[in-house]
Amino acid sequence: MGKYLNKQQIFDAEDGEDLYANEEQLKSRLKFFDNKIQLQTDDTPVKEKINNLLEIGRIQVERYKSLDAWEKAFIAFGIARDNELWELAVEACDVMFLSEEPNALKALGHALWLGVTFPINPELSVAMLQHLVDESPKETDTCAIAATTAHYITSMRCGADDDLIFFSSQMMASVADKHSNVTDQSTFDLWYKTLQLDKPKVFLKKLSGAIDQLVVDDWWIDKDKIKIKLDVDGK
């Protein structure tokens, strides 16, 4: 665990000299990936093209160049979507969300839907759900639903000893405390059942409603087409 969760802040330098050095490093990385894009051909693998765009997007997020970060990530998303590379599509949405551009929450909505629908890297799915917790008022049920979904996903996709299981459990405990001042197991059990968090059909439907509020009926994907394909494939 660590690629998507618990990222350290880049801009934690104590003085201007350190900030300058960091900016120089970012510019060097930016030039590197710009050059890689310039050298791309029709034979360049699609995943490499997407990752080059995402690396630039992440660098620009760190440099507070939000518009360019969004634009690179949105292009990457389109390529990933068209090639049904859903994990990379979620990564692109993450960059768009982190850019804090006007449609950042819409990007988060797409990331959540794709991250729950497809069996991608569970850490990435949990990271998107953590974003939803962070963006929601602590007293709302949305936080509880997001944390419960994170724990549900990790229980389905991870081994019993995976660190992500522990992380999602701590996420649940933290949300319960902030939501209803839950501090002991018996109170937690009551809280859990009262909100029907023990019923996946219930909390996943509520999560879907929260996602719809983020996207505001402006989907960049054909959900119906995806659902039909998943039904055909038996997934």
Image: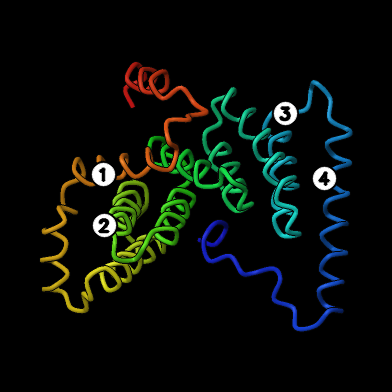
> In the image shown, does 158 or 100 lie closer to the viewer?
100
Q: Relative to 38, is 43 on the left or the right?
A: left
Question: Residue at the spot x=73%, y=58% of the render?
Answer: 64
Packing grade of label 1 (10 A; few <14, some 14-19, many >=20) is: some
Vertical arrangement, residue 52 with respect to residue 128, above or below = above
> In the image shown, does 98 or 186 lie closer to the viewer?
98
Q: Secondary structure at mark 4?
A: helix
Packing grade of label 3 (10 A; few <14, some 14-19, many >=20) is: few
Q: Secondary structure at mark 2?
A: helix
Vertical arrangement, residue 55 with respect to residue 137, above or below = above
Circles 2 and 1, Cβ within 8 Å, touching? The answer is: yes
How far is disc 4 from disc 3 in space, using C-alphas?
A: 15 Å
How far is disc 1 from disc 4 in space, using C-alphas?
A: 40 Å
Residue 68 coordinates in the image, percent (x, y): 75, 45
Foreground tag (1 vs 3): 1
Please name the residue that numbered disc 2 is placed on. 141
Question: Residue at the spot x=64%, y=69% of the render?
Answer: 9
How far is disc 3 from disc 2 in space, using C-alphas?
A: 43 Å
Amino acid type, callout 1: Lys
Please name the residue that numbered disc 4 is placed on. 33
Foreground tag (4 vs 3): 4
Q: Secondary structure at mark 1?
A: helix
How far is disc 1 from disc 3 in space, using C-alphas?
A: 38 Å
Packing grade of label 2 (10 A; few <14, some 14-19, many >=20) is: many
The first of marks 1 and 3 along the sequence is 3
Please name the residue that numbered disc 1 is placed on. 206
Picture quadrant where residue 26 is located: bottom right
The first of marks 2 and 1 along the sequence is 2
